[in-house]
Amino acid sequence: MSAIFHPIFVAMTDPIDKEKRCFHSGGRILLAFASQTGTAKALATRIYEHNSSMCDLVNLAEIAPETLEQYGRHIFIVSTFGDGEAPTEARPFAQALEQSSINLDQVKFAVLALGNRQYSDFCGFGKHLTQQLLRQGADPRVPTTELHRNDAAVFSHWWQKLSETFGIALEPDISDWEVATVMDTEERNESALDLVFYIQCLEHEQATALRFKPKRKNPEFEPFVAEINPAPSSPFTRIRITTDHTKVDKSGTAKLLLSAQPGDKWHVQVKDSKNGD
Ligand SMILES: Cc1cc2nc3c(=O)[nH]c(=O)nc-3n(C[C@H](O)[C@H](O)[C@H](O)COP(=O)(O)O)c2cc1C
């Protein structure tokens, strides 16, 4: 085993470039809000904080409809104001979307519509936004959900659906995460985008999979599950990170989203064990 880690950069063609229309976001999710008094913005921000590695948070007031074409997955959290209308600063976006002829037929979306049943046009803007997205060809992967007065149960049900459909993380529960230290790393084939490192064996001999996340904050990286096969005789657990955890930049260069060096701290959680943990 070697203690040296070399970042690897490999030039490769981004297959998305071959598509007629480009998604420039590299698979990231557009997490958009429209808010008058801050509720929708706060909810969107909360989701973003747990999922910043995979989402871009935007205010609909600050983008043009064409931005929607740059993402393959959209999540909207929007309130309704006036008489069934968009929040004031998002109205130019709403009008531009109505007049636009963007093509969203590769897009999957979810809308959370905030409102109050005391108004006659309950969640009017959220419903209108959904209609516009459907008109442009987008696919409603999570049914548009109307939220009356921030109903916590409805919100959490919607968030659960998002989690299942888009892989969005729910509130983190790190109470059962342990800290493991990277003990060593392994030389790799320089032509491959992978990383092998070793952590000190945890006391979970029966574990078959562990969930990892770097203790040091890495905004690009979410927890992931690594299959392991611990050898009872070895004091180390060997972890191999592969090409799933790469990012392609604008020049078409792929690079690993993380590194591991001896001494690095990782959060580790037993994901699956014979005891049913
Ligand atoms: C002046 C005003 C007008 C509103 N109009 C509507 C409406 O037409 N339909 C609706 O469902 N909710 C309406 N609401 C309720 C808001 O959409 C709701 O309070 C929402 O949670 C606000 O979210 P925000 O803080 O992100 O703007 C209105 C609220 C106010 C204060």
Image (tube, helix red, strand yellow):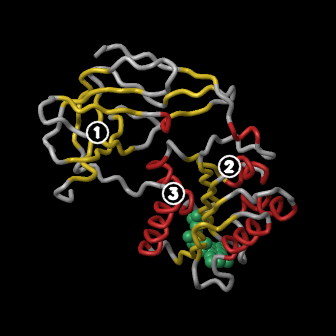
Mark 3, Cα crowd under 10 Å, few <14 / some 14-19 / many 20+, is some
Task: In the rendered view, tell whether residue 232 sits above or below residue 43.
Answer: above
Give x and y (percent) for residue 184. 27, 20
Q: Does ligand 1 reach within 8 Å of label 3's beta carbon? A: yes
The secondary element bearing badge 3 is classed as helix
Give x and y (percent) for residue 255. 54, 27
Quarter where residue 210 is shown: top left
Quadrant, the N terminus: top left
For the residues labelled 1 and 3, the Cα–Cα distance comes to 27 Å
CB contact under 8 Å: marks 2 and 3: no
Which residue corresponds to mark 3?
42
The secondary element bearing badge 1 is classed as strand
Which residue corresponds to mark 1?
267
Residue at 40% x, 26% y is: 195
Most foreground residue, 252 or 129: 252
Which residue corresponds to mark 2?
71
Work out whether residue 276 can be spotted: yes
Residue at 22% x, 41% y is: 178
Q: Earlier in the sequence, mark 1 or mark 3?
A: 3
Residue 79 tag number: none
Give x and y (percent) for residue 203. 13, 41
Q: Earlier in the sequence, mark 2 or mark 3?
A: 3
Quarter where residue 180 is shown: top left
Amino acid type for the residue under numbered disc 2: Tyr
Most foreground residue, 46 or 38: 46
- Locate residue 77 relative to residue 192 in the image: left or right: right
Amino acid type for the residue under numbered disc 1: His
Amino acid type for the residue under numbered disc 3: Ala
The secondary element bearing badge 2 is classed as loop
